[in-house]
Amino acid sequence: MTALSIRNLQKTYANGVVALKGIDLDVEQGDFFALLGSNGAGKSTAIGIICSLVNKSSGSVQVFGHDLDRDPAAVKQCIGLVPQEFNFNQFEPLEEIVANQAGYYGVERGEALRRTEECLRQLDLWDKRREMARELSGGMKRRLMIARALAHQPKLLILDEPTAGVDVEIRHNMWDLLREINQQGTTIILTTHYLEEAERMCRHIGIINQGEIIEHSSLSQFLNKLSAECYELNLREGLSDFVDQSIGGFAVSRLNDLTLQVEVPKEQSLNNLFALLSERGIEIVGMRSAQNRLEQLYMDILANSRRENG
């Protein structure tokens, strides 16, 4: 079943700014989907329309078969939104914030409290349930936003930059949590500027640029477009006299005495490279990717789109 289906969605603001130029987008039930794009590309407008926060100019939006124009209440019931900015009452206890959110969706008070406990335990916030929200750390406030969005048990969770401004440890903890939520059956749409985040977590991606969808595919299909990958190789012995060169079709350059950088074409094997280096007496003791693959492709496709649009 399709969780989200968008057809020819357009939005022109009153000041004449065209934010969406007729986008089509599908997200399947159970997917973990990344919606990527630079600031001003149209991501926030699209999410705002899906969540009934922004009025569309034309086009259609369906969420789990419910049409936004004909049954907006059913669409809202399906969606849990985690916005980028904290927008809860800082002077309310966590338990009330989450329970009241469930109440907004018609959940009876006793059931709302049961769901609140479930959500706060899942987000590791139950021990803080009677504390005021303003007393939480930034990472805990992010988790509270997710707990609140899950209170009415939505089928579709939309997260707008959920790890913005949090430290590395909290970010990785949130990745684990979101994977768990997705594995339990909730469809997730993620917007993020951390492309490593999208590459690690998402199965499909859409890239929006200047109000148009310029890429919509599985992550694996998209990454297959990469013509070459770049690696840094750690050496056992120093090579102070190494000169940048092509070795058997691999572009190899020296970063320092103990580190080489190599560009590996898609059709080539790392084993071939290691054999060629071994023939030259160069022993490899470690390696790592020297680039984020998704980031490189993302920049390439944006550059190509801008050239095509003049």
Image (cartoon, rainbow, N blue to C red):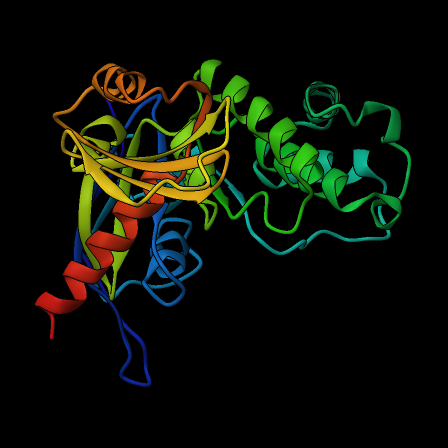
Horizontal and vertical percent position of residue 36: 35, 49
154 sits left or right of 142 in the view = left
**Vertical arrangement, residue 14 with respect to residue 267, above or below:** below
Q: Find the residue positioned furthest to the bottom.
A: 15
Looking at the rendered image, the quarter that the N terminus falls into is top left
Residue 108 visible in the picture: yes
Q: Quadrant of residue 228?
A: top left
242 sits left or right of 111 in the view = left
Looking at the rendered image, the quarter that the C terminus falls into is bottom left
Q: Quadrant of residue 46?
A: bottom left
Horizontal and vertical percent position of residue 225: 16, 36
**Vertical arrangement, residue 102 with respect to residue 45, above or below:** above
Horizontal and vertical percent position of residue 226: 20, 37
- The residue depicted at 36 percent of the width and 56 percent of the height is 43
- The residue depicted at 32 percent of the width and 82 percent of the height is 14
**Vertical arrangement, residue 242 with respect to residue 268, above or below:** below
- In this view, the residue in front, 296 or 6, is 296
**Vertical arrangement, residue 61 with respect to residue 13, above or below:** above
Q: Find the residue positioned furthest to the left.
A: 308
Horizontal and vertical percent position of residue 76: 44, 42
Residue 77 visible in the picture: no
Q: Quadrant of residue 153?
A: top right
- In this view, the residue in front, 133 or 225, is 225
Number of marks drawn: 0
- The residue depicted at 54 percent of the width and 17 percent of the height is 180
- In this view, the residue in front, 223 or 105, is 223
